[in-house]
Amino acid sequence: MCIVMNFDFHTHGKLTKYDEFSIRHFRSLVKAAKESGLDGFALTEHFNTRHFFDVFGTLDEFYPYEDGYYLVDGLRVFPGMEVHTRELEHILLIGSRINIRALRMQLQPYTHKLNYIPIEKLLELTASQDVLLIAGHPVIQQRDLFTLEPHVLERLDAIEMNGQDLRLRSLEVNASEVEQLGIELNKSVLGGSGAFHRNHFGKVYTKLDTSFSTVGELRALLEQGAYTVKVMASSEKTFLQQQLTAELGAWSEPYL
């Protein structure tokens, strides 16, 4: 068991949501994550990605699942997904593979952008499931965050310091704005890269004071404040040059 755990709360296993899940590409991401110093990450694929269930079905085929995570070449990969609601377009859910699969099945009627699920309905679905709820891309949607009803906002476990948002402002301004937003909303701020390419891993992550195996253990660490968000100095340049090569794809994909 590692004493500390470097963890990325927001990653994707596919270059775009229209691609099929490739175990070869995924392995390259895991290799990059390990080389960057990460001990684990949440695989938060878009809930309306092509063949969503193939993602974790493939991991079941190739890797052991222990407690609440897949053990992938020594790295812990936690199941998750990124859900779009009518009020808030980027909500990260992290939980057990059973809970994530069950929730995704219930979201099937809401995959089109003209029919995203109301956030209160999503909270109803997650009420009986032990999942972590994180507001992703808070810089982009902070106005929407402040319009949420207090009882809805209370259900969110944290907001995210997101690597993709570094495109919008300088690293210092973005970090300061998210930290202030966390204070105003009374929410923990966690680091997530939003990675889907190997070059993105390790640029923004969360250093937890101890390792964890389940969402319950993770939530306890967050409540204790036993973590630090890390943003690498090279992050701004990395994310600003997202069109440097064709394989990087597009950050802003049209939603289904």
Image: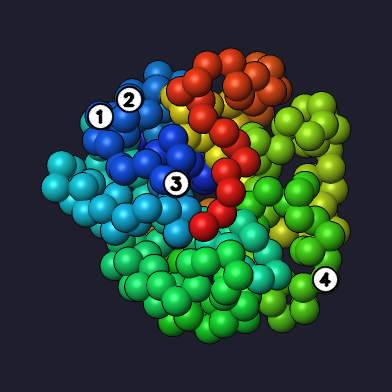
Label 1 close to label 2 by CB (< 8 Å) = yes
Q: Mark 2 points at which residue?
A: 28
Q: Mark 4 points at which residue?
A: 147
How much space separates mark 4 and mark 2, taking CA atoms?
40 Å
Q: Name the residue under label 3.
A: 17
Left or right of 185, for residue 23: left
In the image, residue 225 above or below residue 167: below
Sequence-wise, the earlier of marks 1 and 3 is: 3
- Residue 146 or 34: which is nearer the viewer? 146
- Find residue 248 and report its horizontal and vertical position in percent: 51, 25
Sequence-wise, the earlier of marks 1 and 4 is: 1
Crowd band around label 1 with a 10 angstrom C-alpha radius: few (<14), some (14–19), many (20+): few
- Find residue 29 and report its horizontal and vertical position in percent: 37, 29
How much space separates mark 2 and mark 3, taking CA atoms?
18 Å
- Residue 10 or 182: which is nearer the viewer? 10
Q: Which mark is residue 134?
A: none
Q: What residue type is labelled 3?
A: Lys
Q: Name the residue under label 1.
A: 24
Q: Nearer the viewer, mark 4 or mark 3?
A: 3
Q: What residue type is labelled 4?
A: Thr
Sequence-wise, the earlier of marks 4 and 2 is: 2
How much space separates mark 1 and mark 4, taking CA atoms?
42 Å
